[in-house]
Image (cartoon, rainbow, N blue to C red):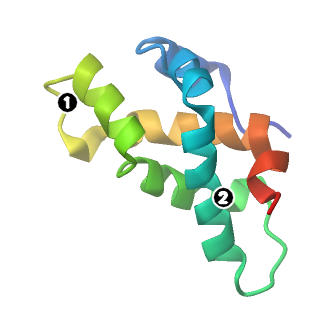
């Protein structure tokens, strides 16, 4: 079952985040890999849905993500970064799960 919805698409399209993600995919994948490794250390098999909240929290402090939002939404407070981080996390998990879990 896909995590990424049409509503997520509309949110990310408002600031061209899909294009930004594609241009900076490697950097974002490193954030996803780090989050996955941190949560899978217990040995429990993780599903994409279980990573959504932690990955979105990590994205909110990721320099690529923050720089993009500061450029496109200079008056947005960091407290609302989750509005874009959660849809981006879902997009990443739907499209790059195999690469995220690959060592």
Residue depicted at 53% across the width and 61% down the height = 54
User: 15 above or below 8?
Assistant: above
- Pick the quarter of the image with the C terminus: bottom right
Coordinates of residue 12 in the picture (x, y in percent): 50, 21
Q: Is residue 30 above or below residue 47?
A: above
Element under label 2? Answer: helix
- Between 13 and 68, the one lying in front of the other is 68
The CA span between labels 1 and 2 is 27 Å
Q: Earlier in the sequence, mark 1 or mark 2?
A: 2
The residue indicated by pointer 2 is 33
Q: Tell me the mark number nearer the camera, choosing from 1 and 2.
A: 2
Give the image location of residue 76, x and y in percent: 19, 30
Residue at image coords 28%, 40%: 80
Mark 2 nearby-residue class (10 Å; few <14, some 14–19, many ≥20): some
Drawn side of residue 13 relative to residue 101, left or right:
left
Could you say where residue 63 lies in the image, as x and y percent from the top left?
Answer: 35, 44
Q: Which residue is mark 1?
A: 76
Identified at 59% across, 63% down, the residue is 35
Question: Horizontal placement of 91 versus 45: left or right?
Answer: left
Q: Residues within 10 Å of mark 1 (few under 14, many from 20)?
A: few
Cβ atoms under marks 1 and 2 closer than 8 Å: no
* Residue at 72 percent of width and 87 percent of height: 42
Farthest bottom residue? 42
Reply above or below: 52 against 19. Answer: below
**Residue 31 locus on image (x, y percent):** 55, 53
Image quarter in which the N terminus is found: top right
SS class of the residue under badge 1?
loop
Quadrant of res 40: bottom right
- Return the residue found at the far left: 75
Label total for image = 2
């Amino acid at each position: 079952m896909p995590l990424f919805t049409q509503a997520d698409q509309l949110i990310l399209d408002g600031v061209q985040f899909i294009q930004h993600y594609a241009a900076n995919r490697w950097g974002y994948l490193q954030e996803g890999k780090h989050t996955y490794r941190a949560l899978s250390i217990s040995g429990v098999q993780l599903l994409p849905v279980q990573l959504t909240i932690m990955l979105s929290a990590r994205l909110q402090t990721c320099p690529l993500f923050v720089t993009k939002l500061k450029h496109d939404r200079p008056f947005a407070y960091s407290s609302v970064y989750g509005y874009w981080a959660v849809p981006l996390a879902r997009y990443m998990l739907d499209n790059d799960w195999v690469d995220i879990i690959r060592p």
